[in-house]
Image (cartoon, grey):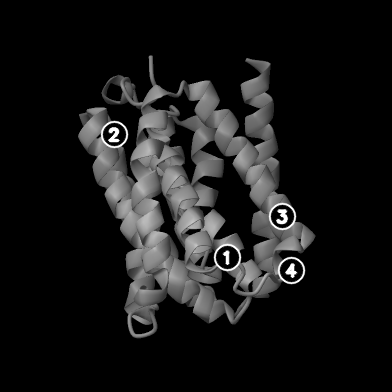
């Protein structure tokens, strides 16, 4: 059975619902505090306890919710024109990702996300993303990176990490980088959510758990923003990245052991 075709028939136990809400709360808190990680943290948690078929849509929807919270403070600084090449590439890559999700087995999905979490966390912890390539490749390279992000957005709801690393390599203030990847992520994951629902036959169980998770994500983002400054942001980010690395390694081990 494909990852999507069984979506509407997955039984959701109370323990799974509880874990889903906890994951949404933690993911939202991470984004509210550190400004990143909704989809990454949610994936790292949800793939361990929820059916793989449910997770990509939940990740996409929770990320959109967190993005909307961020837009309230960033709406006057968004660099939409600069983000357009990435958005164009993302729209091209998105349908391919959704088709790949439709064809992927749950084990392949878990393994792919696990490897992605390990690669992203390792790259950030190593400091290699702080290297600089300047404006190499121009808009064509930005479009290609957007296509990769769009593919991952359609496949597993993780559209943001590849553009984030790319913009880090481009250099410049973090606020400028965020002004580009924020509109990209919002557009791509909004379309990804709609596409997953349109082609996947999402059942009542999936929509129900998504409706429960969205308020938890928003609450977590609000709490994270409220406690910002009480803990070192750099230390918090390293802890989150270490958790993502460990979670990714566990997912890879589980997928390989099956």
Looking at the picture, tell me which residue is in the foreground, 258 or 139.
139
User: Label 4, label 3: how many angstroms apart (C-alpha)?
Assistant: 11 Å
**For marks 3 and 2 on the same chain, the one whose residue lies earlier in the sequence:** 3
User: Label 1, label 2: how many angstroms apart (C-alpha)?
Assistant: 41 Å
Judging by the rendered image, the residue that carries numbered circle 4 is 131
In the rendered view, tell whether residue 82 sits above or below residue 161: below
Lateral position of residue 157 relative to residue 118, left or right? left
Name the quadrant containing residue 75. bottom left
**For marks 4 and 1 on the same chain, the one whose residue lies earlier in the sequence:** 4
In the rendered view, tell whether residue 120 sits above or below residue 51: below
Residue at left offset 40%, top offset 45%: 93
Judging by the rendered image, the residue that carries numbered circle 2 is 206
Image depth: mark 3 or mark 1 in front: 1
Image depth: mark 2 or mark 4 in front: 4
Whole-percent x and y of residue 12? Answer: 35, 27
Q: Residue furthest bottom?
A: 76
Whole-percent x and y of residue 218? Answer: 36, 61
**For marks 2 and 4 on the same chain, the one whose residue lies earlier in the sequence:** 4
Looking at the picture, tell me which residue is in the foreground, 134 or 235.
134
Q: Secondary structure at mark 1?
A: loop
Q: Secondary structure at mark 4?
A: loop
Residue 190 is at least partly visible in this image: yes
In the rendered view, tell whether residue 131 sits above or below residue 161: below
Judging by the rendered image, the residue that carries numbered circle 1 is 137
Image depth: mark 3 or mark 2 in front: 3
Lateral position of residue 110 relative to residue 212, left or right? right
Q: Which mark is residue 123?
A: 3
Image depth: mark 4 or mark 3 in front: 4
């Amino acid at each position: 059975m494909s990852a999507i075709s069984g979506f509407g028939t997955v039984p959701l136990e109370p323990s799974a619902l509880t874990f889903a809400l906890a994951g949404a709360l933690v993911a939202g808190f991470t984004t509210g505090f550190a400004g990143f990680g909704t989809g990454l943290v949610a994936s790292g948690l949800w793939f361990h306890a929820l059916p793989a078929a449910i997770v990509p849509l939940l990740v996409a929807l929770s990320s959109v919710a967190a993005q909307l919270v961020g837009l309230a403070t960033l709406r006057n600084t968004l660099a939409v024109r600069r983000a357009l090449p990435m958005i164009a590439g993302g729209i091209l890559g998105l349908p391919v990702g959704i088709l790949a999700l439709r064809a992927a087995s749950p084990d392949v999905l878990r393994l792919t996300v696990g490897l992605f979490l390990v690669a992203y966390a390792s790259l950030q912890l190593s400091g290699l993303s702080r290297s600089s390539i300047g404006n190499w490749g121009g808009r064509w390279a930005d479009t290609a990176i957007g296509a990769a992000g769009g593919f991952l957005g359609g496949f597993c709801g993780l559209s943001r990490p590849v553009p984030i690393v790319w913009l880090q390599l481009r250099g410049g203030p973090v606020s400028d980088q965020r002004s580009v990847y924020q509109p990209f992520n919002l557009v791509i994951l909004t379309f990804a959510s709609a596409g997953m629902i349109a082609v996947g036959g999402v059942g009542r169980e999936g929509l129900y758990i998504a409706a429960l998770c969205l308020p938890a994500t928003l609450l977590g983002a609000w709490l994270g923003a409220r406690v910002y400054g009480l803990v070192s942001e750099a230390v918090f980010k390293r802890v989150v990245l270490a958790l993502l690395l460990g979670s990714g390694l566990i997912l890879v081990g589980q997928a390989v052991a099956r």
